[in-house]
Image (cartoon, helix red, strand yellow):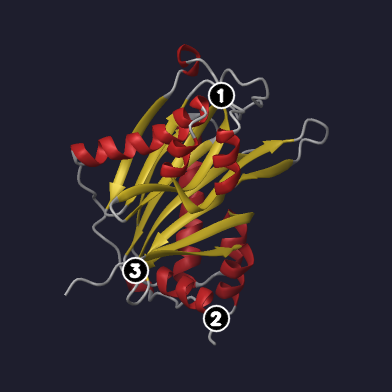
Amino acid sequence: MKNIGSLFMVAAVCGTTAAAQAPAIPTAEQAAIVATALDYGDGFYSGAPERMERALHPDLNKVTVQALAQTGRYIVGYSTYSGLIEMTRAKVALLAPEKRKIQGSALSMVGDIALAKVTSAMFNDFLTMVKVDGAWKILNVLWVPGPDAPNRPKLPTADAQKDKDAINRAVADFVRGVQTSDAALLEKVLHPEVTMSGFGALPNAKPAINRTRYSGIVEAARAKLIPVVPEAARTSETKIIDIMDGMAFVEATLPNAFFVLQLANLDGEWKILNILNKRIAPQK
C-alpha cells in the first residue's frame, strides 16, 4: 500500500486556494465560532465535559511553549482530546464566573476554516477550527497561561513593529521553502515539534485530518517530493491575524495552497508550531 500520509501532505501543499481577501464573517457563523470557543474555555471553568467534547475535534493538537526556570530552555507541553474532556469532567479548573474574565472572539473565516481566540484569567488561546458536519470543531491550539495564573511565565517584550517584521520574515521563509522545496529554509522556521494538519475530503468520504510532523515536512522537501513552483508563479499573500502574549496567528495564501500558521516567540525567534493547510480544487 502506498504511503497515504505522504501523498495527502504533498497534495495538500500543491492545491489551489480560495481568494486571498476573505469576506466578513457572516453573523450566524461568527456566533457559532464564538460559541465553540466558549464551550471550550468556559466549559473548562464550569466543569462541563459535554461542552468541551462538543467543542473539540478528536484530532486536536494543543500545545504550549514555556521556558524552564532552571535552564531557560524551552519545552513544549501537550494536551489531548481525552485529557481535556476528562480533566473537565474531574472539575480540575472550577472557577467562579465573576473570576473567569473570559472572552471569545472570531478573528477570520475562510470557507470551512476559522480562526478564533479565547482570553481569560487563567489561559489565553489561539484556536484554529474546522467545520465538520455543519459544526465548528477546534483542531489546533497554541496557548499561554493567563494574567491571573500563578504559573504565568515572563513573556517576551512586545514591540509591535519589530514583531510584525520578524513574523513576516519567518512566514516568507516558510512560503519560499514550500514553493521551492527548500529543506534548509523550512528547518530554519519550523519548530522541531511542529505539526502540519492536512484538512480535506477523502474520496467518497467526509473531511479528514492527516498530520505530518517535522521530519515529514523537511525530508519531503529535501527529497523534492514537494513540487517546485515555477519562479514566475511564486506569488503569495500573508496576513497577520493577531499577535498575543508572544504568539502569532497568520494566514498565508499561495497560488497553490492555503495555510493557517500558529507561531511562538522563542528568545526573539518566531517558530512555527502548528500548521493547518487545505487543498482547494481549481476553479473551472
In primary-sequence order, the first of circles 1 and 3 is 1
Q: Residue at x 64, y 55 (%)?
A: 193
**Quadrant in the rendering for residue 34:** top left
Task: Indicate the secondary structure of the residue bearing disc 2.
Answer: loop
Q: Nearer the viewer, residue 7 or 179?
A: 7
In primary-sequence order, the first of circles 2 and 1 is 2
Of the two numbered discs 1 and 3 in the rendering, the one whose residue sits closer to the viewer: 1
Of the two numbered discs 2 and 3 in the rendering, the one whose residue sits closer to the viewer: 2
Task: Estimate the x, y position of residue 196 in percent, counting from the top left.
Answer: 51, 60
Which quadrant does the N terminus fall into? Answer: bottom right
Q: Residue at x 52, y 20 (%)?
A: 121
Q: Residue at x 55, y 73 (%)?
A: 221
Q: Judge left or right: residue 26 versus residue 252.
A: left
Residue 3's label in the rendered image is 2
Q: Nearer the viewer, residue 2 or 194?
A: 2
Q: Nearer the viewer, residue 72 or 61?
A: 61
Separation (CA) of disc 1 from disc 3: 39 Å
Provide the residue designation for mark 3. 256
* 103 vs 23: above or below: above
Provide the residue designation for mark 1. 122
Which amino acid type is shown beneath numbered disc 3? Asn
Asked if residue 1 shows in the view, the reply is yes
Which amino acid type is shown beneath numbered disc 1? Met
Task: Estimate the x, y position of residue 284 in percent, counting from the top left.
Answer: 16, 75
In primary-sequence order, the first of circles 2 and 3 is 2
